[in-house]
Amino acid sequence: MLNRLADQGIKATTVVLDPWYRDKDARGRVAYLTETVPLIEAASRVAGHVFIWGFPEAVARLIDHTPPSLKLEGWLTWYFKNAPSRSKSWRPSQQACLHLRHPKAPMYPEHFYAERHREPARHNRLEFKMTPYSVFEEALLSGFIKRSEQTGFRWQKPESVIAPLLRMTTKPGDLVIDPTAGSGTTGAVAIKLGCAVILSDGNATALKTARMRLRD
């Protein structure tokens, strides 16, 4: 889908990639790398910003396999305290996301400024930029946590995890693409921010869930 859009000359601002993570063992990490590198290359053809989600163990390997047109802008972490686990070792409580960026792709840290910071920023008198942290602490969607947001889709991310990515890289009217759309969280956030969005997914259940969620 990304290559077809690129061949048609479609240009987006941001692509969000949240593919199947695979197992954490060596075999799973190789499979993840093999599948995601072409995905990132295709995304780089249509957008200035590319976000790629995964387990930290697998995402780390992508840093040395990104297209030359992109540079690593940041390593982002979603941290959640309510992870259930039967592990006798460290309890998994994070997912990682790489922000890859074309050098000339604009970013909008001012979208995060408090009102008192806006005027000094306009006159370049803001000594410390009030940009967001690279770690997002947001609970998993389970039980009564953000019940109205839950779709029943097993791997659904909270909108509050995707929102900072789009706020930093888009402005109203920009185009966002998510070819691994799942329950449609990227679409829901993009629409609330005034962006256009193209979603797709290889899972029929995911597409049905996203259509129901975004039909209004």
Image (spheres, grey):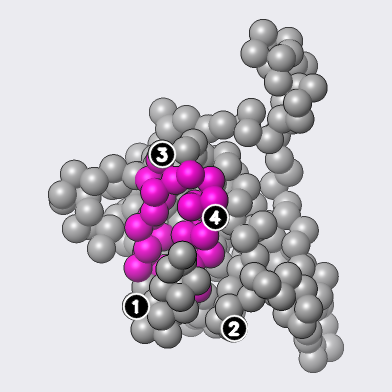
Magenta stretch: includes residue 12: no
What is the spatial separation of the Cα atoms under label 3 and label 2, in whole angstroms?
Answer: 30 Å
Q: Are marks 3 and 4 in contact (CB under 8 Å)?
A: no
Q: Which is nearer the N-term, disc 3 or disc 2?
A: 2
Q: Which residues are magenta?
A: 174-200
Locate residue 150 relative to residue 84 in the image: left or right: left
Give, as a three-letter code, the residue at label 3.
Gly
In the displayed orientation, state which residue is furthest to the front.
Answer: 216
State the mark number for residue 189.
Answer: 4
Q: Is residue 67 above or below residue 205?
A: above
What is the spatial separation of the Cα atoms under label 4 and label 2, in whole angstroms?
Answer: 18 Å
Q: Nearer the viewer, residue 133 or 149?
A: 149
State the mark number for residue 173.
Answer: 3
Disc 2 residue crowd, few under 14, some 14–19, many 20+, Cα 10 Å: few
What is the spatial separation of the Cα atoms under label 1 and label 4, in whole angstroms?
Answer: 21 Å
Magenta stretch: includes residue 191: yes
Estimate the x, y position of residue 153 in percent, counting from the top left: 55, 81
Give, as a three-letter code, the residue at label 2.
Gly
Disc 2 designates what residue? Answer: 152
What is the spatial separation of the Cα atoms under label 3 and label 4, in whole angstroms?
Answer: 13 Å
Which quadrant of the rendered structure holds the N terminus? bottom left
Q: Which is nearer the N-term, disc 1 or disc 2?
A: 2
Q: Nearer the viewer, residue 6 or 209?
A: 209
Disc 1 residue crowd, few under 14, some 14–19, many 20+, Cα 10 Å: few
Q: Which is nearer the N-term, disc 3 or disc 4?
A: 3
